Amino acid sequence: MNHSSFIKPGVLYGIRTVGSYNLQATYYFGRSKTQALRNLAGEATEERRSAQKEILRSRCKRNGLHAPRDVFLWVGVEDVESAWDRFKQRLRWSPDVEQVQELGDNWFTSTLSSDNFPVWCRATATALFDAPRVQQVGRHAVIEGPVSSEYAAALLLGALQLPKEDAVKQGQ
């Protein structure tokens, strides 16, 4: 058995819960290999968000105070465990995010507003899983390919830092 035997596609998701912790919004992040959850990945529409909330309540037992108030992250990935480790690492090392061990390993709060934190999470997921290639041309970074306005804004505002392996230096 080799490593490729353990690579499974799946979905990473992030929700803002109904409950709060120390008067701060609480966020739960999870992952699943279930086909039913993977089928709901794609463009975020109101209908799809409702279906995502419902499947989290019914299949993932997200009820009561930890029921989803809002689903803000739902990303299909090819290797769910590797993607989960990379995303969770970014959450843990962000100065604006605090892990709430009292609630569990997947629970977080943030000093960012409840409007800005989901934007940061989506931009981080885009940078990790859908990041366009960046080339260094002189003193300027040039992004190849189409990017979302959310990703570009986060990059410009410094909310994201591209991994060094993503930057490709060209001759100077």
Image: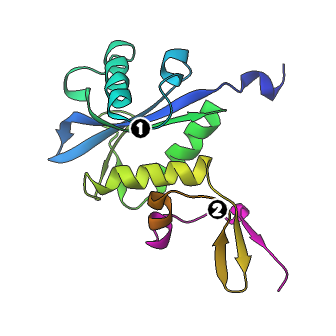
**Residue pictured at 47% horizontal, 37% vertical:** 43
Q: Residue at x 65, y 57 (%)?
A: 132
Residue 81 x %, y %: 61, 32
Q: Position of residue 56 (x, y in %)?
A: 36, 21
The residue lying at 61 percent from left, 49 percent from top is 130
Q: Is 77 situated left or right of 156 in this image?
A: right
Residue type at tag 2: Pro
Give the answer, above or below, for where 135 lies relative to 165.
below
**Mark 2 falls on what kind of element?**
loop
Neighbour tally class for label 2: few under 14, some 14-19, many 20 plus, Cα within 10 Å: few
Q: Which residue is the site of mark 1?
A: 44
Mark 1 → mark 2, Cα distance in angstroms:
26 Å
Check the image and tell me how it is coloured: rainbow
Residue ID at (85%, 81%): 171
In the picture, residue 48 is in which quadrant? top left
Answer whether residue 170 is magenta in the image: yes
Along the line of sight, the residue nearer the viewer: 24 or 79: 79
Q: Is 45 situated left or right of 66 in this image?
A: right
Q: Nearer the viewer, mark 1 or mark 2?
A: 1
Which image quarter holds the C terminus? Answer: bottom right
Q: Amino acid at mark 1?
A: Ala
Instruction: Find residue 90 and report its horizontal and vertical position in percent.
Output: 51, 52
Give the quarter of the figure containing the N terminus: top right
Residue range of the region highlighted in magenta in the rendering = 154-172
